Image (cartoon, rainbow, N blue to C red):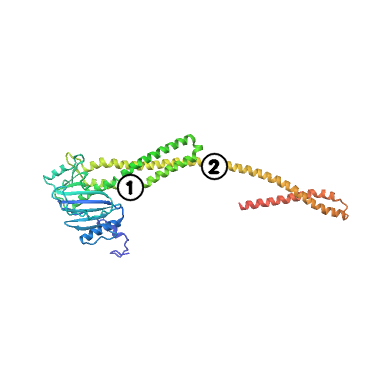
Amino acid sequence: MANGSFGFPVAADRSLALGEIHARPYPLITSPRVIIQLAFMTDGGASVDNAVLAQLARTRGVAAPQADARHYIMAWGRGSLRWERHTEFSTYFYEGPVPRSFGGQINDHPFGDGFSPPGSLIAGVRLEVRKWTDGAEKLVQSFDAASLCFSEVENGMAAAVTDFRQDKDGLTRILLLDRGLAPARAGALVQRLIEIETYRTLAMLALPLANSLSPQMRRIEDGLALITQRMQQDVKTGSDEMLGEITTLAAELEAGAAASLYRFGASRAYDGIVQERIAALNEVAVAGYETWGAFLQRRLAPAMRTCRSVEERQANLSRKLARATALLRSWVDLQLERQNSQLLSSMNTRARLQLRLQQTVEGLSVAAVSYYVVGLLGYIFNAAQEAGLPIGATAMKAIAVPFVVLLIWWIVRRIRRSHGNGARKTG
């Protein structure tokens, strides 16, 4: 761990935290200039980006970026190529000389036949920065009037124009008219406009997912409604079956919610970035045209509301399923308690019957053992009678019977008590 200028220990990530604010400076743009930015989903991970950049660096004879780098800049002819790695996508930003005519062919750019895309293309922007002259406003007529957005920005020092439609190369066309912006301000404005298009596209990724989840949720809602109706009618006999059905519905819902959790969360974050970038434009409407913010608010906001609605439906439906499951479980638990109560009652009845049977067996066993003991004593009394004892053997047996019975009964009772005490101590 390195020490600071005062000799204090420095946190391991301090340099990264301090350097991040300077890690992605805005490009310095001097009009006229053309910018192409492509955003690719990182389907193959960071290693694919590293391989693409290494190949591009070899063609230019420069050093490739480090494996853990998150941004990189290289010279490319009369322009430059910037690369940045984001959470789930990476961007390739090229700026170079503007073609002779607006929307014309760009001869020297890195995205030709030798370029290997690192993943699937999600957003592409072609932005041209041109001087705002009297004839420049004629370029606005080349955009689609149905979705044309034209507004002044940077306190009237520039104007941003787009129709959010794609050219023959699949790139969204943007025109930035410059009345004398400093290169740093022009670069910041260019970056802001490109990010609006990139992040609004990424935000819209959640809409197809939301549309695909809606039928599933409708089916789960209908299934839950049927189960609750059955609960009102016949919960006693079908509680176990209904509990199984509602558990299946809950599992299906949670699977869909888990699959959409990241995408809906990312969509909210991207939409927030778009709103921040639009607010930073400080647009001033041009008479007869729509602003970027108003157009995107009308088109993007309903899609985001749809995504939030589906996410809220998932949460509400999950709570309803949980409540229905709790009700069914309560009824099942009540039934189990009743069954357990009946089982205990029957066990008590059987225990009483067993006790009575045991007492009967004990009485019979006392009589039987006493009979055999008296029989054994008879042999002794016969021998005593033959030896001359004045009392007859039959009389002595008759006298011994009550004593033998009492003795055997006492012994049996003592044994039973000792077993009972042992059982209580064990319990």
Give coordinates of residue 200: x percent, y percent: 26, 46
Residue kind at label 2, given as amino acid type: Glu
Q: Residue at x 61, y 42 (%)?
A: 346
Circle 1 packing at 10 Å, graded few (<14), some (14-19), many (20+), is many
Which image quarter: residue 316?
Answer: top left
Front in this rendered view, residue 371 or 108:
108
- Lower sequence index among marks 2 and 1: 1
Give coordinates of residue 251: x percent, y percent: 42, 45
166 left or right of 418? left
Q: Looking at this view, name the residue that lies furthest to the front.
A: 113
Residue kind at label 1, given as amino acid type: Arg
Give coordinates of residue 135: x percent, y percent: 11, 45
The answer to whether mark 2 and mark 1 are in CB contact below 8 A is no
Front in this rendered view, residue 254 or 50:
50
Q: Give the residue at mark 2.
A: 337
Circle 2 packing at 10 Å, graded few (<14), some (14-19), many (20+), is few
Assign a secondary structure to mark 1.
helix
3D distance between C-alphas at marks 2 and 1: 45 Å
Give coordinates of residue 143: x percent, y percent: 18, 43
Assign a secondary structure to mark 2.
helix
Q: Looking at this view, name the residue that lies furthest to the top.
A: 233
Q: Residue 246: which numbered mark, if any? A: none
- Please determine whether, in this image, residue 3 is positioned above or below residue 291: below
Q: Residue 263: which numbered mark, if any? A: 1
Q: Looking at this view, name the residue that lies furthest to the left.
A: 134
Q: Residue at x 18, y 40 (%)?
A: 145
Q: State the quadrant of the N terminus.
A: bottom left
- Please determine whether, in this image, residue 181 is positioned above or below residue 331: below
